Image (tube, rainbow, N blue to C red):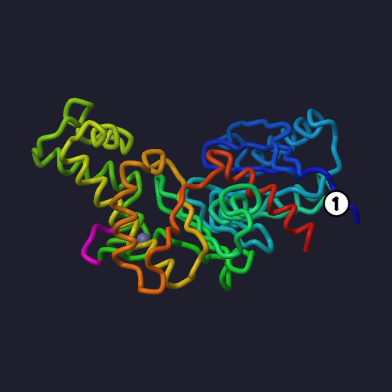
Amino acid sequence: MQDADCAVAMDVGGTQYRVAVVDQGGSIVAVRKGRTQPRGGPQGASERIIAAVREVVEEAGSPRLAGIGASMASPVDPATGVLHHPPNLPGWNGYTMKPTLEEAFRIPVYIDNDANLAVVGEHRFGAGQGMQHLIYMTISTGVGGGIMIDGRVLHGARGFAGEIGHIIVEPLGPKCSCGNTGCLEVMASGTAIARRAASELEKGTQSVLTEMGKPNSVTAKEVAKAARQGDALALEIMRDVAIYSAYGIVSLIHIFDPEAVLLGGGVTQDYELIRPTLEATVQENLMGHHKGRNLVHLYALGDEVSLYGAAALVFDQQEQ
Ligand SMILES: [Zn+2]
């Protein structure tokens, strides 16, 4: 079969969805977005998404489509597309869009988790091109990731592999949503940055952050801004984010021997603040045969990484 020209890519998050037509070269030809919640639950959202797909396909000039790739903000069984307890999509547990989309469009449908698809997208269109062993780590509200080995995403036995955010980096640290203590997510995410700042301000620690708003509504973005102004508390928080992230990265490098670790997510918009400490801590803690290699880089595809990943998933499947 001759390769089709384009893929339909969709990115379904807790707040909004985006659908796009993406061509083989990685150009977004047409895109639409809308609200995922709250009307009609998953079935209602699927209907809105299907209508949006029809619109983008028409706008793109009805190209030949290789399939539909869907990125979900949830643990996913990649074989069935069934979601497992999505934290930000209440009512979607056990739901899959796969049969509905297959019936509506009569083309193959592939569904995976957003962090897994980020690594697939970076591999095909972004900073991981030409690599076969790749790790993507997103530091955002939470910490997540995707692991690629020999050019394929590592799913594990049941689709739950790649939970990078739950590497324990500080056993005596605060409690994580997963039930453990001191996971990377609870030490280095945007949420962790904001919580730590709030708790220090409540204790009366001097900081320019006290002038930026109420102590318990300080955001990670404001902490980064204060760090750029030389604020001692903010600098200390960002230094610790760099150190804990580096601990996680070192473990991943030792286990998977990747060609690159790509960092993405909101917190890395301020990467220059954490980069020197992060890189130094990684180098200090790497085993001898890895030392001197600069493996940590920023991702390349920005906010659209999941859309690119969903399209890349379709093209990858087509070539197999
Ligand atoms: Zn955890």
Residue 275 % position (x, y): 34, 48
User: Which segment did they paint magenta?
Assistant: 171-175
85 relative to 65, above or below: below
Residue, disc 1:
3
Q: Quadrant of residue 195?
A: top left
**In the visual, does 171 lie left or right of 135?**
left
Q: What's under tag 1, amino acid-wise?
A: Asp
Q: Residue at x 69, y 51 (%)?
A: 312
Q: Main secondary structure of the magenta part?
A: loop
Residue 46 % position (x, y): 68, 41
Residue 169 % position (x, y): 30, 64
167 relative to 124, above or below: below
SS label for mark 1: loop
**In the visual, does 225 lie left or right of 137?**
left
Q: How many marks?
A: 1
Mark 1 is surrounded, within 10 Å at the Cα level, by few (under 14), some (14 to 19) or many (20 or more) other residues, namely few
Q: Residue at x 57, y 63 (%)?
A: 148
User: In the rendered view of the protein, which quadrant contains the N terminus?
Assistant: bottom right
Residue 226 vs residue 258, the one in the foreground: 258
Q: Is residue 172 magenta?
A: yes
Outermost residue, right direction?
Answer: 1
Assign ligand 1 to one image quadrant.
bottom left
Residue 74 % position (x, y): 54, 53
155 relative to 206, above or below: below
231 relative to 134, above or below: above
Q: Residue at x 62, y 62 (%)?
A: 77
Residue 121 vs residue 228, the one in the foreground: 228
Q: Is residue 197 magenta?
A: no
